[in-house]
Image: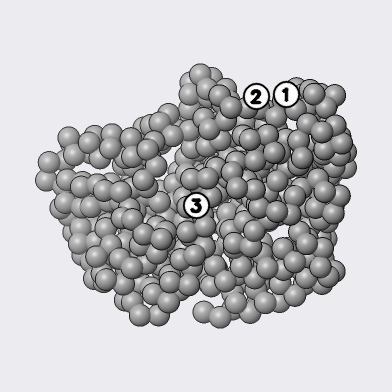
Amino acid sequence: MYTTPTIRRALAATAASAAVVLALGACSSGGGGGGADSRGDITIWLSNNETEIAWGTQMFEAWNAENPDEQITSQEIPAGSSSEEVIGAAITAGNAPCLIFNTAPVAVPQFEKQGGLVDLSSFEGGEQYIEDRTGDAAEQYQNADGEYFQMPWKSNPVMIFYNKDMFTAAGLDAENPSLATYDEFLATARTLVASGVAPNAILPAPTSEFFQSWFDFSPLYAAETGGDQLVEDGEATFNDEDGLAVAEFWATLYDEGLSGKETYQGDSFADGEAAMSIVGPWAVSVYQDAVNWGAVPVPTSEGTPAAETYTFSDAKNVGLFSACENQGTAWDVLKFATSEEQDGQLLELTGQMPLRDDLTTVYPEYFAANPAYEQFGDQAARTVEVPNVANSVAVWQAFRDAYSKSVIFGEGDIQTSLDDAAAEIDALVADE
């Protein structure tokens, strides 16, 4: 995905802060909060995203109106290089809020290692609540011991956005695009570029930040494997036959000049520099007035039916932090904030998909009134998360370095690079 400038800056800040977060983990005990029965006022942090602030404001106002002795005070996550750095620093200082509604899954293993998070499974009925709400996908958010140090909250399942006007101008079917298989996708990409409608068929960011592979390799690997994570049972999976097929698909796009190797300073899809992009439902509101777009699942080698295709989740979750004095109240607020009613408000106000089982069935009226989001609601049932493993940032950086060298820039043998990255990642994951 080539992201909008705001999102791209946020992601870049996450990458820049990785070393700081890792360093903080070595020197923190996470502070000392109250027990699971402690009750009283709490503080929560929200993302500085305008629509999420609107959701958070109505949520805590509704809670406060019914709970005068257990009030929520809310603020945006304080300014810093990234939210992960700010959260890590708050854990170290022992002054983290009770709940943070913007916790990146990739950062959770480190926050847990710092002693900064409370195991939600430790609350009475906690594990059952999470699994009843989220369904089978909840398992991806457990640690190695099967504990939940994060509440699965919301996802932005990524799909292929395509510019219908460019497809039409290139003589392609804009309503039923030929994009399901790798061969079809490549043929379509060649036609788009050869026709001159855009200099790139698709333009994922070719930069080396650890998270960039979540928006090129990871979605297609999830689709090709039917839902495998990049690390399972402590070992890398991506250097298998499926991973090689995905990598070679992207390598062909780069080798044939269908995807550029230079960073584009802007939004390539909105600016007409690329005819396609890999994005989530946040893009519906961003592009609705800028591009005549359509959306399809990411491709697979054999053309997996849409109803069976997996993708990357791009989730943000909620952490309950150990510095919290009134953890009993915080747990009740967390359940209130992820209730069916509040998840409906989240969907309505942000267009992001609650990590809730059978989403389209639970909110049929919303999707009927907002058909542009319906396929994302369906796709949300088949998402794959960043594995919850030790040294997670270093793990994804190791993968990105190998991928960039062999796939994007064509240096060295692809299978060898995947094997080498897998060996390095296996060692990182085993190093607790």
Mark 2 and mark 1 in contact? Answer it, CB < 8 Å. Answer: yes
Q: Residues within 10 Å of mark 1 (few under 14, many from 20)?
A: some
Q: Is residue 362 above or below residue 160?
A: above
Q: Which mark is residue 165?
A: 1
CA gap between label 2 and label 1 equals 6 Å
In the displayed structure, does residue 151 sit left or right of residue 299? left
SS state under label 1: helix
Q: Earlier in the sequence, mark 2 or mark 1?
A: 1
Residue depicted at 37% across the width and 67% down the height: 88
Task: Provide residue 20's location: percent of width, then percent of height.
Answer: 43, 71
Q: Which residue is mark 3?
A: 9
Badge 1 amino acid = Asp
Image quarter of residue 349:
top left
CA gap between label 3 and label 1 equals 29 Å
Residue, far top: 369
Q: Nearer the viewer, residue 391 or 228?
A: 391
Q: Which residue is mark 2?
A: 292
Residue 405 seen in the current view: yes
CA gap between label 3 and label 2 equals 26 Å
Image quarter of residue 240:
bottom right
Residue 227 seen in the current view: no
Residue depicted at 20% across the width and 62% down the height: 325
Badge 2 amino acid = Asn
In the displayed structure, does residue 240 sit left or right of residue 1? right
SS state under label 3: helix
Q: Which mark is residue 49?
A: none
